[in-house]
């Protein structure tokens, strides 16, 4: 499991009902652009098992990562609706929703990097990872996205790097 540092500063304000978004302390545009270029352009381009796709659960401005159907995976590693292969999506505010294992989800919350989806108890096993604010925070969020890829693919996707 990752050993995350504590996130500095106050937790941002977020919604308590879907759509679960971050309202304060959003990513500055250059930080958002760097995160987008890595996660939604470079990462899928270099990893044929991944692709960027429209989100099936989030607001229309969100961009999702999708695990190819050829990769055997647990159905519990993905976001609703049933049959989805979406395991992560990036919101326009810079925050992410990720599906990760329970232990990592708890660690993310404890270290102040995110919070559970308001419907987590209803089976929406997503963690809202707060928007990175600088290069150091991008590095942490990249680790979390990679952990979500590993969780979704049961470590069958190789060669992805931060």
Image (tube, helix red, strand yellow):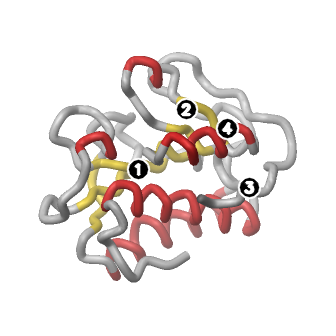
Q: Earlier in the sequence, mark 2 or mark 4?
A: 2
Considering only order in the chain, which callout, 2 or 1, is on the residue closer to the N terminus? 2
Compute the Cα span from label 2 to label 4.
16 Å
Q: Secondary structure at mark 3?
A: loop
Q: Position of residue 16 (x, y in %)?
A: 57, 18
- Of marks 1 and 3, the one in the foreground: 1
Residue 24 picture location, percent across and down:
72, 34
Disc 3 or 2, which lies upstream in sequence? 2
Sequence-first disc among 1 and 3: 1
Q: Residues within 10 Å of mark 4 (few under 14, many from 20)?
A: some
Badge 1: how crowded within 10 Å, few (<14), some, or many (20+)? many
Tell me if label 1 and label 3 are in contact, CB under 8 Å: no
What secondary structure is marked by label 1?
Answer: strand
How far apart are the two marked residues, 1 and 2, measured between alpha carbons? 14 Å
In the rendered image, the quadrant that contains the N terminus is bottom right
Quadrant containing the C terminus is bottom right
- According to the picture, the residue beneath numbered tag 2 turns out to be 21
Q: CA distance from mark 4 to mark 1?
A: 17 Å
Spot occupied by residue 119 in the image (x, y as percentages of width and height)? 45, 20
Residue 88, numbered circle: 1
Q: Element at badge 2? A: loop
Measure the alpha-carbon separation of dots 1 and 3.
19 Å
Q: Residue at x 25, y 48 (%)?
A: 74
Estimate the x, y position of residue 82 in percent, counting from the top left.
Answer: 18, 34
The label on residue 109 is: 4
Tell us which disc is closer to us: 3 or 4.
4
Residue 160, image quadrant? bottom left
The residue under the point 36% across, 78% down is 158
Which labelled disc corresponds to residue 133?
3
Q: CA distance from mark 3 to mark 4?
A: 17 Å
Above or below — where is 87 with respect to 19?
below
């Amino acid at each position: 499991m990752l050993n995350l540092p504590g996130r500095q500063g106050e937790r941002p304000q977020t919604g308590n009902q879907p759509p679960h978004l971050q309202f304060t302390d959003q990513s500055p545009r250059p930080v958002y652009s760097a995160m987008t270029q890595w996660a939604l352009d470079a990462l899928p381009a270099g990893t044929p098992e991944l692709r960027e796709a429209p989100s099936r659960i989030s607001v229309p401005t969100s961009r999702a990562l999708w695990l190819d159907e050829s990769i055997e995976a647990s159905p519990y590693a993905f976001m609703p609706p049933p049959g989805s292969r979406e395991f992560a999506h990036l919101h326009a505010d810079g925050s992410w929703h990720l599906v990760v294992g329970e232990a990592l989800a708890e660690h993310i919350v404890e270290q102040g990097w995110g919070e559970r989806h308001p419907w987590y108890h209803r089976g929406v096993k997503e963690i809202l990872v707060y928007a990175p604010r600088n290069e150091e925070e991008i590095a942490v969020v990249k680790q979390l996205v990679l952990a979500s890829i590993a969780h979704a693919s049961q470590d069958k996707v190789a060669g992805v790097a931060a």
